[in-house]
Amino acid sequence: MIVSRRKLIGMGAGAAGGLLLSGCDRLNDSPAVRDSLASAEGLTMRSQRLLMGDALAREFSEAEMSPSFRVNGSSRVEDSAYRRLLGSGFAGWTLQVGGLVHRPLALSLDALKAMPQRTQITRHDCVEGWSAIGKWQGPQLGAVLGTAGLLPNARYVVFHCADVLDGKPYYESIDLIDAFHAQTILAWRMNDAPLSEGHGAPVRLRVERQLGYKHAKFVMRIEVTQSLAALYGGKGGHWEDYRGYQWYAGI
Amino acid sequence: MSQPPAPHQDETPAPKGGDSVHRHRWPTRLWHWLNAITLAVMLMSGLMIFNAHPRLYWGHYGANSDPAWLDLEKVNGGIPFPGWITLPSTYSLADARLWHLAFAWLLVLGLLGYLGWALVSGHLRRNLAPRLGELAPAHLWHDIREHARLRFPTGAAALSYNVLQKLAYGTVLIVLLPGTVLTGLAMSPAIDAAWPWLVDLCGGRQSARSLHFLCAGGLVLFFVVHLAMVLLAGPVNEVRSMLTGRYRLPPDRKDAP
């Protein structure tokens, strides 16, 4: 059989393509490969933090805001206690602050509103690729944590949420660098109105230098911990545990 | 390090068609194959990431209710790029990001290393920068016509890159690769805090995302033409030169002047 060089190469490329495709998925499923790929996350986090220090995320003017801000993730909370609170405008609700703190707190919505407020018009970047610009207002998380007083072994701040996604309670976590960043606030107000249910009433975390899934909605309880290993899936958040997203979402 | 190609040395007789010469130095060969792997992973995982929100916008913001200049949401049931071209082959934004953001480091480090070497070694100035005469319209037009007729340079003329090669390789090295990296970084909320000028230069985060996609498209276009040229110019000789550095100069055509 005479096979031209060009045909041979074509056949070779086809076979290589097929191998590549199944090979790619096999590599994608290999724990060793996934571990080495995931090791880039730490490198990315350290490099980005070195570059940005405590720089602020861009703040926009009112004219630059999105005409409409997309609701994403849970848009409704089914929990009956939550629904009663929502009906009453969160009158009897308190935000629990506990864990590795000197003074555990129970802060009402009025108490959060009475604290010094920060208002910021920022860009919200979803991991999927879209962005929306909105206006957020609330006390700085650093001030709340300062009131509670952190114990020396405190490393992470965990946000326990009222919503359940895919049958699992939503939670998220950040470390103290982001927790004490000036723009990290517990927003109860968005676009000059109290936070709607879809956007995370009564309180949503804003952690402006990370992607949207870190911005926990429906925050009910804040827990300061030394490690993330003992919580739920151990990776520090719902998307990290069940969907394989990076814990550090700076890119 | 191996010796640079020396097309114009007076002491040795000029190589002629059929001679075996040293064509590519090791940094070029190493970087070439590193890129072949890295860019394949970046493209395939990037297309999967695009599938997560198959719409492109201009400006700082852009989501479903905003006007998009490219909307592929209705294509293939909302997953416009099919499994044979994405990594992984079934929908997973998380896995695609795992690959994309790890191989991005290889791309960046390889690019910085190669650009640094190309500058210091003189490769950029001597072999890649077009000479003024080469950019004359008549010369460009002549080269385009010769390429279109598949008459590639032979003999001693094949020792150095022709002007179309220089322009293609230069665009990849100076425009498209740095462009994908910088527009990619401009999509990072952390980098936007660190270097606000970068996202402004792009015209906003959604513009950066659009430009990222267009730069990647440019690289795909280069890849298609590059592969076609390798096949047409003699794949064994070309691939060998990129593996070992040895290149057999194409013999002069009988009808060539």
Image (cartoon, coloured by chain):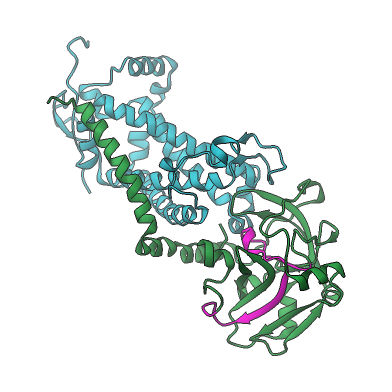
Chain colours: A green, B cyan
Instruction: Classify residue B255 as left or right of residue A90.
Output: left
Q: Which residue lies furthest to the bottom in this view?
A: A102
Of residues B66 and B17, the one drawn nearer to the viewer in this rendering: B66
Q: Position of residue B135 (x, y in %)?
A: 42, 22
Instruction: Classify residue A114 as left or right of residue A161.
Output: right
Q: Position of residue B101 (x, y in %)?
A: 47, 55
Q: Is residue A246 visible?
A: no
Question: In which quadrant will I find the N terminus of chain A?
Answer: top left
Of residues A227 and A164, the one drawn nearer to the viewer in this rendering: A164
Q: Residue at x 44, y 43 (%)?
A: B83
The stretch in magenta equals: A202-230
Question: Is residue A132 within the magenta segment?
Answer: no
In this picture, is B58 found above or below A183? above
Q: Position of residue A102 (x, y in %)?
A: 69, 90
Q: Position of residue A156 (x, y in %)?
A: 60, 77
Q: Residue at x 22, y 21 (%)?
A: B154
